[in-house]
Amino acid sequence: MRKLAVSFEPHGKDSHVPVGTTLFNAAHWIGLPIDSTCGARGTCGKCKVQVLEGETELTHADRTKLTEEELAQGWRLSCQARAQEDTCCFIPALMRVPKAATMGTGRLVLLEPNVKKVYVELAEPTLEDQRSDFERLRDALAEEGYGVEPAPHALRSLPAALRASRFQATAVLGGDRLVTVEPGDTRGVSYGAAFDLGTTTVVGALMNLTTGMSAGVESTLNGQAPFGADVITRISHAMAGPDDLEELRGALLETVNGLLAGLYREAGVGPEHVYELVAVGNATMLHLLLGVDPSPISVTPFVPAFREPLDLPAKDVGVDIHPDARVHTFPIIGAYVGADIVAGILSSGLARDEELRLFVDVGTNGEIVLGSSEWVVATSAPAGPAFEGAEIRCGMRAAEGAIEGVALGESVELQVIGGDVRPQGICGSGLVDAVAQLRLAGLLDVSGRLRSAEEVPGHPLAGHLVTIGEERAFLLADGIPLFQKDVRELQFAKGAIASGIQVLMDRAGVTPGDLDEVLLAGSFGTYIQPESARIIGLVPPVPVERIRSVGNAAVEGAKMALVAYPERLIAYDLPSVVDYVELSGRPEFNELFVSVLAFPELEALELEAVP
Amino acid sequence: MRKLAVSFEPHGKDSHVPVGTTLFNAAHWIGLPIDSTCGARGTCGKCKVQVLEGETELTHADRTKLTEEELAQGWRLSCQARAQEDTCCFIPALMRVPKAATMGTGRLVLLEPNVKKVYVELAEPTLEDQRSDFERLRDALAEEGYGVEPAPHALRSLPAALRASRFQATAVLGGDRLVTVEPGDTRGVSYGAAFDLGTTTVVGALMNLTTGMSAGVESTLNGQAPFGADVITRISHAMAGPDDLEELRGALLETVNGLLAGLYREAGVGPEHVYELVAVGNATMLHLLLGVDPSPISVTPFVPAFREPLDLPAKDVGVDIHPDARVHTFPIIGAYVGADIVAGILSSGLARDEELRLFVDVGTNGEIVLGSSEWVVATSAPAGPAFEGAEIRCGMRAAEGAIEGVALGESVELQVIGGDVRPQGICGSGLVDAVAQLRLAGLLDVSGRLRSAEEVPGHPLAGHLVTIGEERAFLLADGIPLFQKDVRELQFAKGAIASGIQVLMDRAGVTPGDLDEVLLAGSFGTYIQPESARIIGLVPPVPVERIRSVGNAAVEGAKMALVAYPERLIAYDLPSVVDYVELSGRPEFNELFVSVLAFPELEALELEAVP
């Protein structure tokens, strides 16, 4: 793979990073802090490290910020020095105790947002000092180690802001960009927003950038839902013409702005104090957010218009935060492995830790990532809508009245969303549970065939095995039969994902026993029972304690990138270390698919049917 | 001063440039071409020179583009190598004959616009090559030496543009920014606009960027005129509140867009093919164009909000060119020495040639620049409205019916705008002529006092000397008397400018005999008779052949920057080599002012009164 080892003293830790990664980023890959106030732009001079082994090129910033003696001793600005070979360097002790927060899958993230507020007290102008307002501010910021360019919108607020408070003001920086200037000292008030734009669900979080704490999280149905349940139908709608594309964009924006309004209300925060928004989501949602035609994504050879991380004016995007703030999107790996998955890789540490992990985001498309700090492979498998409860006759979305959990013993025990309400149907996690429990109860054979009541005489649940029309079914509750065909739909769905997993494992030469952890992600992954996933063969046969639900790993990644700029830089590097495997057109995929349709033998899972 | 000498072999020419200027820019300062296709961004690698004397730092771009052997021999990318001391380098012969155009005051400008059109034929995507549309384009552009970032607006047009013409398309670049992508080969069609935003007059030029030729020039009254004749009254209006500021911005924009519409009509060009606009103008006009409150400019200590060159989205500014193009403004030297003067310095070569020149833009504020390639000083003198024809009782703007030239001999000969029309009043250039001719005719004494008919018995024009009410006057035509007080107004106006000139000459230790050239600029400077300017003492007593009208030097500078990016870079460097002298609060200014109110003795100008 395309990785180098960078080791850090005195910690004695190794980081495996792509060629060309800065030593600063390499340290952050493994959570080691290096001092910096300029966001790794080479201007504050605080991030120096001493290179002990390996060559790194001397840069202009090095010469500006370091003495001849320091240069001769191998000191370099770690944010500028790029690893070109295996490298070892020494990190000085931090001069300050960094603020940190636990985020993602229990990762300690150092608080260092891209948005910074810098308070300055400027000398008032005189005939002897006729520097412009901007130069006066720029010079003061330069003294603090920040370099800024004149941005037209910030110039508009500058004369009034400086004169409102006797030239004492707070500059709001988004990286090296001047977002705005506020009169007086407003350092205490600084927010950002993180969004995961899912096809079904949009999740937004408001983050307090001075504390790194969440100020609120909200989620809602994507307002594009009326235009189709999955990305393919959405794209079909967008293809009808520019107005339809704009309609989809508008619906998504309305959803985002609706969530923001709720977050603002709850937290008592105004949009003018939200200085950045980080958005992740699948490739199609990011295209639609920008109003870029996504149609080539839906037809072979599945090509997105862009994969890069973008830095967009909030005003152009149309999100209701500070009008001169920016929206940052994560990069995309492929047409069907989007920025949400990059965010998941970031927040789970999959590409940075030594553990070998399998990450599965279960949905209409199952996104699958396998790897560790050494290498990462990823693919996308077309699972179809079964996991969303669609194509299942009694299926429904995970809403009130949906059966989300099933336990079969002497009787049928159901867990219904909303608690003590009458079940209306079954959602994805309930379906997985039901099928797994039928397997355990001996009511469903390894091929996926439902047994009949006659085949299991005396079984306490035999009475639930019925025939409706000509089709077998298991009665989960009054009026809620799980049909044979529904079981088949689930088999197809899990078969697609299991095949994708198998392709990646074969390619990497990995067996289930090598896996340290299996992470189930996404809104569906959060609710699925690890044991059930194992029983139906959705995931490889690993001990159940190695299977973990990680919730919405995508929005966690976006939040991390919001409160910690170095994490964002890592996210931007991630696509370069992930090998994308296209399943379309691979003959072995179809063979594999057929071979994994059946369920695992219970013995192979060290389980036995009860009763 | 803050300049270094960079000499270029085999030409044997020296360039005097600010410390830190790149060798590439230093060559362009004196009109020497160096090959380059990337606009001095270090990506094309074509601009290498061999440094023979002087140290320049090795850069990352050098290492990327040059071989070890070349580096060892002192070859550097001239666009990255910055002169830190006196330097000598060798420029290889050009591999191509550069297109050039004569612009400004007869300067040869090499055609190298910031806007470039690059035609690419891309491989169509396959399952084996799933690069995104943007990556496909970026990779092809990189092969041609162009690096681009993904811009959201360009992404919007990308999928359709590529698929409209089988992945053969033309990328429009504004520097390293992707403006848009057009299907097929559109390299032949490329335009830019150059504007001078004057308080009184706005001038716009449409330039064909493939030929460097003008496709049209139009000028009109600034639509802000109803809000006041000069910048101070405009600023007073803007201070009333944000709506009034917006009203001024709107009026200026309407003027600019009106001129553009006329230019488009004349040239048969659509706004979608105008990919850049370069704007110059005084500090107040640039503030108003952006909607930035200019009020601190109008009160001591006269501080603008910004002085930097700006790079603005055309859509934000509101000018009617390609919506995703940019507007570039020149830098400002001081509150009253604006971007128009920087453009004049650029187009006149004042800061680049060895000749010592005095540049005077005559108007309500007289901007004065003195210098050569060795040093430059500048100031602004408050001349008042006399030169614009205001405060003169029979004064009028330079419109049809205005007396613009006066010759006194046996009779009064008038040159009237519009030709054979009845004179309605007198404009600035006519006023200067009239007063100069009165001096020559012996009808106005050195102190500025009009003689009476009794004092000049037998003079052929004695009959024109009249008394109206209690005031003496000279009848230029029926109903158009030039009053004693009008002469005084002109004396005050020219006195202010002459004082400013004297302050600069004293400061630099320069006498009139040292001046190689006196350049009269601006719409007024174009029409003034050099001899008359000399006779009234507006300019120092130099031989008349050294006084030259240079027309609208400001719009010429903007045009040069449009067709030649290296010229733009020079303009951006100019403020750092110009010493701005503030006249307010200088006690010697008032003394000087009083001393230069009188007219020069004719003998001192080697003239004598006739008849």
Image (cartoon, coloured by chain):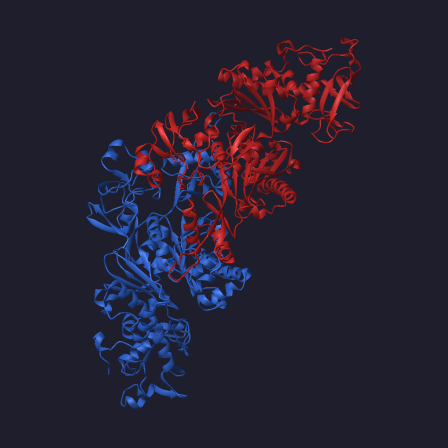
Chain colours: A blue, B red
Residue A213 percent location from the top left of the image: 35, 53
- The answer to whether residue B495 is above or below residue A277 is above
In-front residue for pair A106/B339: B339
Residue A574 percent location from the top left of the image: 33, 54
- The answer to whether residue B334 is above or below residue B188 is above
Q: Residue at x 70, y 16 (%)?
A: B437
Residue A362 percent location from the top left of the image: 35, 67
From the viewer's perspective, is A231 left or right of B387? left
From the viewer's perspective, is B234 left or right of B158? right
Quarter location, residue A369 = bottom left
Quarter location, residue B10 = top left
Q: Residue at x 53, y 64 (%)?
A: A240
Quarter of the image that includes the C terminus of chain B: top right
In-front residue for pair A120/B105: B105
Residue A169 percent location from the top left of the image: 44, 39
Count numbered badges in the picture. Answer: 0
Using the rendered image of the protein, determine whether residue A143 is visible from the camera's viewpoint. yes
Q: Residue at x 34, y 77 (%)?
A: A414
In-front residue for pair B173/B471: B173
Quarter location, residue B593 = top right
- The answer to whether residue A499 is above or below residue A569 is below
Quarter of the image that includes the N terminus of chain B: top left
Using the rendered image of the protein, determine whether residue A152 is visible from the camera's viewpoint. no
From the viewer's perspective, is B128 left or right of A51? right
Q: Residue at x 30, y 91 (%)?
A: A454
